[in-house]
Image (cartoon, helix red, strand yellow):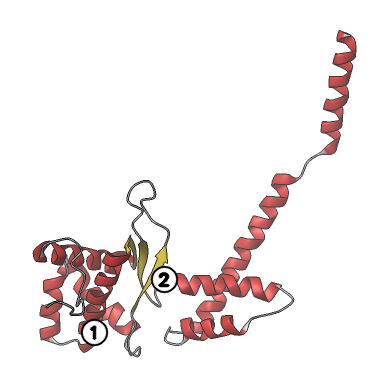
Amino acid sequence: MAGGALKYRHLSRSSSHRQALLRNLVTSLFTHESIKTTWPKAKEAQRLAEKLITLGKKNTSATRRRAEQIFYYPLTHINTLFTTIRERYLHRPGGYTRVLRIEPLNKHHDQAPSAILELVDGPKDMRFHMTAKTLVRERASEEGVRELTAKNIQKVTRYRDNGMEELEKEVRRMEKIAGDEEVREKARWKVDERPREGWKMERIGRLRQKT
C-alpha cells in the first residue's frame, strides 16, 4: 500500500534468497557469538536471532521444531540454544543481541555502512570489554570513574552471571596488557648513547682522512 510503513528490509533479494541469507547469518552468529556484515543485514538478522532466543527460553517440543527449521546445522546448534544460550538469558527480559556500527568493511568499492552483530553477555561482548578498558584508564586518572562509566558498568553486569567479578577479572587482564605494552614501548625507544657517540667520532675521523 502506498505510503505504508516498511515492515522489513527486502535487501534487494527475492523472498527465498532473503530467508536463506538471514538463516545463514543467524547460524554464523550462534557459531561465533559475533559477526560482521552490512548494517541492513545486521538489523534484519537481529530480529530473527531475538526470536530464536525467545524460542529457546520457552523450551518446548514445538519451539524446538521451529528452531530446527531455522538453523542450517540444527544438530550442532539446537543443543547450544536450549542449554548455554537459554541459561545465559533466562532472567533477561529482552535485548539479547546488539548491533554496533563500524567503518565500512569494503572501503575501496561500495562503502556500504557496516556493523557488528553480537550476543550480549557472551565471551565476545564488545561493550563489556570497552567498559573494562575505560575503567582501567579512568582509575589511573586524577578525575576517577565518571558517572557515565558507572552507568555502563551497571548495564554490562546487571544480567551477567558474577558480573562484577568477571568485570574485575577483565580489568586486571587489561592492566597487565597495558603494563606489558608500556615496557615494550620503553624498550623500543631506549637508545644507548655510548655506541652512538663512538659511531659519530669514527665517521668524523674518516672524513678528516679523506680531506
Quick one: 50 or 44, which is closer to the camera?
A: 44
Point out the tag, 1 or 2, that comes first from the N-terminus: 1
Residue 198 versus residue 147: which sits nearer the camera? 147
Which percent across, then down, holds residue 186?
Answer: 72, 51
- In the image, residue 131 lies at what x, y percent? 53, 74
Element type where label 2 sits in the image: loop
Location of residue 140 by image quarter: bottom right
How many labels, in total?
Answer: 2
Name the residue nearer the viewer: 83 or 143: 143
Quadrant that contains the C terminus: top right
Residue visible at 34% across and 47% down in the picture: 109
Measuring from the top left, give residue 143's x and y in whole percent: 72, 78
Residue occupying image coordinates x 34% and y 82%:
95
Query: Which residue is located at x 22 percent, y 78 percent?
Result: 52
Tell me if residue 44 comes above or below residue 92 in the rendering: above
What residue type is disc 1 on? Answer: Thr
The answer for how far apart the CA atoms under marks 1 and 2 are is: 20 Å
Q: Are marks 1 and 2 in contact (CB under 8 Å)?
A: no
Amino acid of disc 2: Pro
Is disc 2 surrounded by few (<14), some (14 to 19) or many (20+) residues within 10 Å?
Answer: few
Marker disc for residue 207: none
Quadrant in which residue 46 is drawn = bottom left
The answer to whether residue 90 is above or below residue 182 is below
Tell me the SS state at disc 1. Answer: helix
In the rendered view, tell whether residue 45 sits above or below residue 164.
Answer: above
Q: Which residue is mark 2?
A: 123
| Residue at screen point 25% across, 76% down | 47
Foreground: disc 1 or disc 2: 1
Indicate the position of residue 142 as horizontal and vertical percent values.
74, 76
Mark 1 Cα within 10 Å, few/some/many (few <14, many 20+)?
A: some
Residue hosting label 1 = 54
